[in-house]
Image: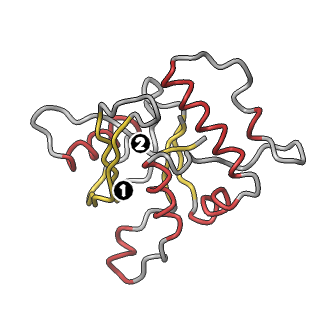
Amino acid sequence: MWSCLAGFIEPGESLEEAVRREAYEETGIEVGEVVYHSSQPWPVGPNSLPCQLMVGFFAYAKSHEINVDKEELEDARWHSREDVRKALRFAEYKKAQRLAAAKVDQMIKGVKKRRSSSAGYLAKSGEFAPMFVPGPFAITHHLISAWANQDPPTGAKAQMKKPPSGFVSKL
């Protein structure tokens, strides 16, 4: 499963500074422009009271080399819009989203998983699906969907900002 980078704001830090710092700390990627997208209380669910506010941003990379901090992330890489669109259209996407929602529910309840985390990601053919992203219950889903489905930027200004492909981190 792939997601977006996440972190916490430090005292005295602006939201934009937090985005830049977290991206650099977790991946070594220097970020320039930061653009607000949306927000969501977290955790969410039937029996949980929101205790944090998740704020989603798009950030434009000034560097493209990734140096993953293994204390923070399992992996990080660039993905093309087309690969992400394929993942969002995958035939068994709903099945994967139900599994992801169940895992979040287990985390909220503190229940230990009892089966292979990859078992629900098998396609009917028995092969692994190319990738999954969190379901529509998560702000990450909306950030990734908005990025994947936007029209490709054009013009000189867009070319200066445009990384070789998209970026998400592995949970």
The percent coordinates of residue 75 (x first, y second) are: 54, 36
Position of the N terminus, as image quadrant, is: top right
Left or right: residue 91 versus residue 50 is right
- Which residue is labeled 1 in the image? 61
Instruction: Give whichever of 81, 61 is nearer the camera.
Output: 81
Classify 31 as above or below 158. above
Instruction: Give whichever of 97, 128 is nearer the camera.
Output: 97
Which residue corresponds to the image point at 14% horizontal and 40% vertical from the top-left?
13
The percent coordinates of residue 149 (x first, y second) are: 52, 69
Secondary structure beneath disc 2? loop
Circle 2 Cα neighbour tier, 10 Å, few/some/many (<14 / 14–19 / ≥20)? many
Secondary structure beneath disc 1? strand
Query: What's the distance in space between the residues labelled 2 and 1, CA to CA?
Result: 13 Å
Q: Label for residue 5?
A: 2
Query: How are the colours assigned in the image?
Result: secondary structure
Classify 75 as above or below 84. above
